[in-house]
Amino acid sequence: MSEGTAPSAGEAAAVADEAARERLRYLRGSIDNLDAALVHLLAERFKCTQQVGELKARHSLPPADPAREAAQIERLRRLAEDARLDPGFAEKFLNFIIDEVVRHHQAIADRTLSTQNGPADG
Amino acid sequence: MSEGTAPSAGEAAAVADEAARERLRYLRGSIDNLDAALVHLLAERFKCTQQVGELKARHSLPPADPAREAAQIERLRRLAEDARLDPGFAEKFLNFIIDEVVRHHQAIADRTLSTQNGPADG
């Protein structure tokens, strides 16, 4: 805008839009950082469930544990509420992960003992 | 087992089973810790996308950004490979999150400007 004159509506809008785009870049940077952290935590979680699957296959431990799973869901819903995350979404998220774990455990069980059912421990 | 005698096969199996159950408890403790961290990171991520949704609704910024989304997927797949997580799963995970973000943004857009389409920025 020219010195000493009030900005036109168009100029003001352009400044506001540039500020919005800058804020958008800032927020996207945070989202990317959080996504990197999420991927690494998920990798670590699957390392744990991989070991659980191998342990269960080796020791003929029961494949599924409904009480454990119910407790996990209850706990995650509670944690989500504290963090102001939709508890329904937290439960959906856990089920999404467990589906993948079950697939991994199935593969382990197929490799380890072809006579045994695939153990699930999300 | 009795002192000075070799353990019976049954005793040895019982000891091995108890060790396996102890290891299972240990691994489940790690899984629970990681789940708590995941829920809190997800809560933080939705705080960011909530702000993105409000920003886009206020400034009439384009709702979707296919180039941004493609870059996010590409980056997450790369990070997953480095962390030895299935890149296909990382992509599925991002899509799962983005579906939820789109639902949130739709709600924001409905509240903010009923004439505008819901902005998506996963």
Image (cartoon, coloured by chain):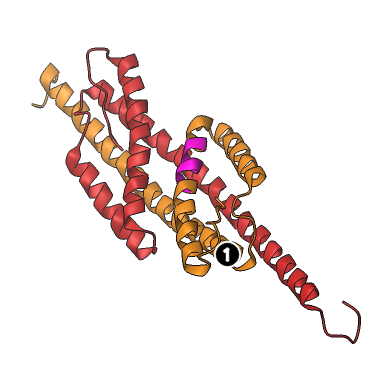
Chain colours: A orange, B red
In front of the other: B27 or B58? B27
**Residue A4, picture quadrant:** top left
Q: Position of residue B39 (x, y in %)?
A: 51, 42
Q: Look at the numbered disc 1 and give the secondary structure of its residue.
A: helix
- Report the residue that reaches farthest toward the top: B114
Residue A86 visible from this viewpoint: no
Instruction: Tell me the kind of residue under disc 1.
Output: Ala
Q: Residue at x 74, y 66 (%)?
A: B18
Q: Where the C terminus of chain B falls, by quadrant? A: top left
Dominant SS of magenta comes to: helix
Is A75 positioned to the left or the right of A85 in the image?
right
Answer whether residue B58 is magenta in the image: no
Residue B42 visible from this viewpoint: yes
Q: Position of residue B98 (x, y in %)?
A: 33, 37
Q: Residue at x 58, y 35 (%)?
A: A77
- Report the residue that reaches farthest toward the left: A2
Q: Position of residue B51 (x, y in %)?
A: 36, 30
Q: Where the N terminus of chain B falls, by quadrant? A: bottom right
What residue is pinned by disc 1? A57
- Report the residue that reaches farthest toward the right: B3
Q: Residue at x 41, y 40 (%)?
A: B45
Q: Residue at x 31, y 16 (%)?
A: B110
Answer whether residue A92 is magenta in the image: yes
**Residue B2, picture quadrant:** bottom right
Q: Position of residue A111 (x, y in %)?
A: 47, 68
**Region rendered in magenta:** A91-97
Q: Does B38 sit above or below residue B23?
A: above
Q: Does B101 sit above or below residue A59?
A: above
Q: Does B59 sit above or below residue A115?
A: above
